[in-house]
Amino acid sequence: MVEPVVEFRLLGEVEAAVGGRLVELGHARQRCVLALLLIEANRTVSADQILDRVWGDLPPQRARSAVHGYLCRLRRALTAVDAVGLVRRPGGYVLTVDPMAVDLLRFRRLIAEARAAEEGGTALALFDRALGLWRGEPLAGLDSPWLNGIRHGLAMEHLVAELDRNDLALARGRHAELLTELTARAAAHPLDERVAAQLMLVLYRCGRQGDALDFYDRLRRQLAEELGASPAQALRELHLRILTADPALAAPAPAAAGQFAQPVTPHLLPAPPRSFTGRARQLAALSEAMHDPGGTVVISGAGGLGKTWLALRWAHENTERFPDGQLYVNLQGFDPAADPVHPAVAVRSFLDALGVPPAAIPPDPEAQAAMYRSLTAGRRMLIVLDNARDTNHVTPLLPATPTGAVLVTSRRTLTGLITAHGARPLVLDVLTDTESRQLLTGEFGVRRTEAEPQAVTALIRHCGGLPLALGVIAARAAVHPDFPLDVLAGELRQATTRLDALDGGELAVNLRAVLSCSRRALTADAAHAFALLGRTTGPEISLAAAASLTALPVARTRALLRELADAHLVDEPVPDRYRMHDLVLLYAAELSAGLDTGRTALRRLLDHYLHTAHRADQALSPYRDPLTLPPPQPGVVPEDVTHHRVALAWFTVEYPALRAAIDEAGAEFDMYVCRLAWALMTFCDRRGLWHDQAATQRAAMDAARRLADRPAQAHAHCGLARAYISLRRYDDASAHLQQALDLFRELRDQIGQAQAHRCVARLFAQQGDHRQALPHDEQAYELFLAAKNRRGQAAGLNAIGWHRAHLGEARQALVHCRQALTLYEEIADRQGQATTWDSLGYIHRRLGRFVQAVTCYERALGLFRELGARTFEGGALHSLGDTHHDAGDPDAARRAWQDAFGILDQLGHQHAEVVRAKLQRLGPPAAMPEPSRPAGAARAGGIR
């Protein structure tokens, strides 16, 4: 058990301390409320119970309001105390706190450990620690009928513990030190026969046989006078044995410390792991860290990563470096079937291993620790402290001199050990795919592995490099050597059965049990946050999104995530972004499914993504007609993404989570699906993510139909058509545009009709039919004009100019595009300005004005780059290269086309091969870029 930094004290005056400094808790009644919540720590207490137990028969006026007020003040007082929360739960209130932070609960835990201890000296030390927590009368200064009853019960607990401790001390020959204490205790409890028996035995062993007999005689008379009773049989027998000087009552000889032979050379390392694979880099890092004497290394990582195996492999390979022996203890800090081993117990076992006779071991734990440090001082030993819970679990076991080495494994980072004791951290990650394959090949055999390569690849993928998961699968395959590996792979393919497949039948090889140990070691708030993270929709989650998910302030959320990261349940690959291993996420999702608040938390997360995505889309395309969104749920804080670059960066980072949110939201959240798909359109269009755009718009279409939301259906038809045009699925695009136009007409939505006509024009233009496209853009312009939509008017004018330029009407086209540019500049629409500069570049090129064309394209490129519009940037570079080529400058053309190819090929754009062909015709092979996409990969079409 480790002493907490936060302490709540009930065994004396009611106090709270953080790092030894007292927290102001308010007046006596408020401390009564806190005392009640601490006594019932982590259990729900109703408002009625608070009123009854704190005020009794004299409740305050407006009783429930008074209770609420006291709780609010307590919550404020405890704000600075990490890992403690006062929360509202169904049925009442709960103070969530580590039980070991409450002295009363720690006292009871120590007493239970003492009574369970097999060795007397260890039990005695535990009793002393427990009794040392008492500072006086419990709950001092507080008064209510319920608290007075609790106080009396605690006094009885204390007395029984003292007497149990006295029995142990008497058994170890420590009678003399008990005389004064027991004399006072007998005076305070004159009719307690157990106290009387202990005092009589102490008196007898101190050579005061007559006093022992006199005390018995006085007690016998007092019992007869006051209770009309005689002493119990056990006390009468003790009196007789003292009277006859029974030799069995003589005190045992106390242990003689320091009288033992030279310490032996211990070899406590367990057997090395049989099938150890990979980890060459980590083994080398251990050797480097242990090169100089006195090194301490902390191997940390999630449960199941093979920390113990790594430590034992290195230890066995390097035993010759430690000629004075190797000590090992499993501290059981995260054991699914046992409590952590107390450091004092570990010290005692080390003394045995070092050859100290039991009679020479001092009873006091501090003296034992001193003896351990003395015996290890100056010796070249390796001490392996496996599965430590935290820094305080390890510190008492560190040697005093830097001649030995210490190897610690833990699921926590043990920052305190690194900071205060100079330990070097070695954070363990999952195995690589190559290492995982080597491990399974070693277990399955080469023939079986080669017979089912696809099944082996699936096993590796679904185990995610976690050695425990791979080991369980290997064991199951060994038990059933005739079973196809594809059967196991099939169990892992389904997320709902994956954790079941990773149950080896025992707690130590059950992934759920291993993870549950890490979860149980968390504070209540961190454990709740961990479960809620099972609702995340992407591979990562930002701090802001996690704060909305948990409905907690950002600072509090960061503290909880830091606790989860320290326990290696989440990783923080970059500041304020967090991710989980796939199998850990599945476990968290199972926990989340059992929470009443799980779906509410998911709604908050979707709200966070929707409101932030809407803001970001408005930053990317400020003149796009915004959605009308309801206010976010309480606890949701959308991010500030109003600047263009911030919005683009946010979309880039959060895009996988946004896609996953649309895919996984389910029918209950159809409105979010429709709106998120709408908010993603600008980003997908600029980044050339047309397959994704088609998928999100199909999901939006299905959701809108379930909602019977006709405007949403119309917009989804239009959005899906835009994606299909870019993917050159022209027939599909045409069908969706016709449905979109019909719906917008029925809805009398002029803007929607205009946008649909613009898409129809784009459909024809993409196929090179500008004559068919022109009327649709002209109709769109008229609709925008009627609706007084200036951005739409500018877009229509630019498109009309573009079509006329392709139809040979370059001078008319120039007029239209200049009018469009003026409008775009008036409304400060940079995307519109960029596309219009691109159009003007094309027109000037058609007119043979190459200098002007280059200037226009360069203006367009600058804007496209600022906007992050990669598709448009690639198209403008392609056109710029054409212009340089027409102007007789092949070197400039080559540079522009090479840049264009790099972008378009990365996007999978149909024009990439067109540009590549131009480069082949233009320059030597050395200048030829190779395609980055595999031959035959799907390509998307249409730059404009």
Image: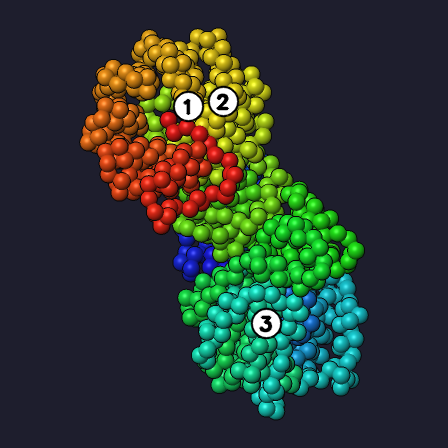
In the image, is residue 389 above or below residue 94?
Answer: below
Quarter of image, res 858:
top left
Q: How far from the left and from the top, in percent, is residue 788?
A: 31, 12
Quarter of image, res 595:
top right
Are discs 2 and 1 less than 8 Å apart at CB? yes
Identify which amino acid the numbered label 2 is placed on: Tyr
Q: Earlier in the sequence, mark 3 or mark 1?
A: 3
Q: How far from the left and from the top, in percent, is residue 603?
A: 52, 32
Left or right for 421, reference 811: right
Left or right for 607, reference 891: right
- Quick one: SS at disc 3? helix
In the image, is residue 323 above or below residue 673?
Answer: below
Left or right for 20, reference 381: left
Identify which amino acid the numbered label 3 is placed on: Arg
Q: How far from the left and from the top, in percent, is residue 32?
A: 51, 47
Q: Earlier in the sequence, mark 2 or mark 1?
A: 2
Name the foreground residue: 133 vs 18: 18
Residue underneath mark 1: 766
The N terminus sits in image quarter: bottom right
Residue underneath mark 3: 313
Residue underneath mark 2: 730
